Image (cartoon, grey):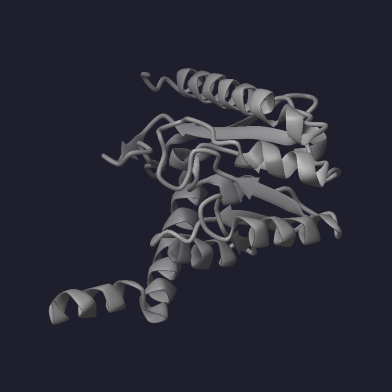
Amino acid sequence: MARKKLFKRILNSKALHFSMSLVASLLMRAIYSTCRVEKEFDEKAKPYLAGEKPAVFCFWHGRLIMAPFIVPPKRSMSVLISHHNDGALITETMLRFGIGSVRGSKKLGGAKALLALLKITETGGNIAITPDGPRGPFQKAASGAAYVAAKTGYPLVPISFSATRHWRFQSWDKFMLPKPFTRLRFTAAAPLLIHSDEDAPTATASLEASLTTLTRATDEAVGVAA
């Protein structure tokens, strides 16, 4: 029991998160620097990717690792991250890319997180959410992103990436990590507008369909099998 508590304490230690986030960010930058990068954004999404307008950017949890490299310029970005065990590591890693975080989920700290997100919108900051995080089901959108969009007045902008050569983890989200010297493709679909809380269920279904279609098309474009 004592050994188990010690192991848990080490896993949750700030020192470990600091070290692991440093390694993760360096690895991400090293891989990205070797890739042949392509970008294909829907015309209506381009003003948001250029930083001209703020939005809630959405991507599947399994396609999270390359998201920092298409952060729009000129505007701050804050990611909604759960209080799950891996949330602290993700938070530390995002900070190394100048990306802030808001901790919370529907089950824990949701109201506090929403207030923090609303405060971000007061200064025109961007928000990023993985609608199937933190634990799935795989590529099934929860209502949180649509609800945040309804409250903030921001549109939902689906984004994704794929890589011809990659490692695929045996995790619930089928996490994709590009290999060095590969073809890396970033994509964005048309923004989804939500006008009220009542629109959230329909918007959630539309977001899921858009992200699924976008990710599948991105995979096919670089020759990744379904």
In this view, the residue in front, 174 or 50, is 174
Residue 65 visible in the picture = yes
Taking 138 as reference, is 94 above or below it?
Answer: below
* Residue at image coords 60%, 49%: 69
In this view, the residue in front, 117 or 71, is 117
**Quadrant the N terminus occupies:** bottom left
Measuring from the top left, give residue 194's x and y in whole percent: 78, 31
**Quadrant the C terminus occupies:** top left
* Residue at image coords 26%, 73%: 8
The quadrant in which residue 70 appears is: top right
Measuring from the top left, give residue 183's x and y in whole percent: 47, 33
In this view, the residue in front, 198 or 73, is 198
In this view, the residue in front, 92 or 146, is 146
* Residue at image coords 78%, 45%: 151
Taking 18 as reference, is 100 above or below it?
Answer: above
Residue 38 visible in the picture = no
* Residue at image coords 64%, 32%: 158
Q: Is residue 186 left or right of residue 164?
A: right
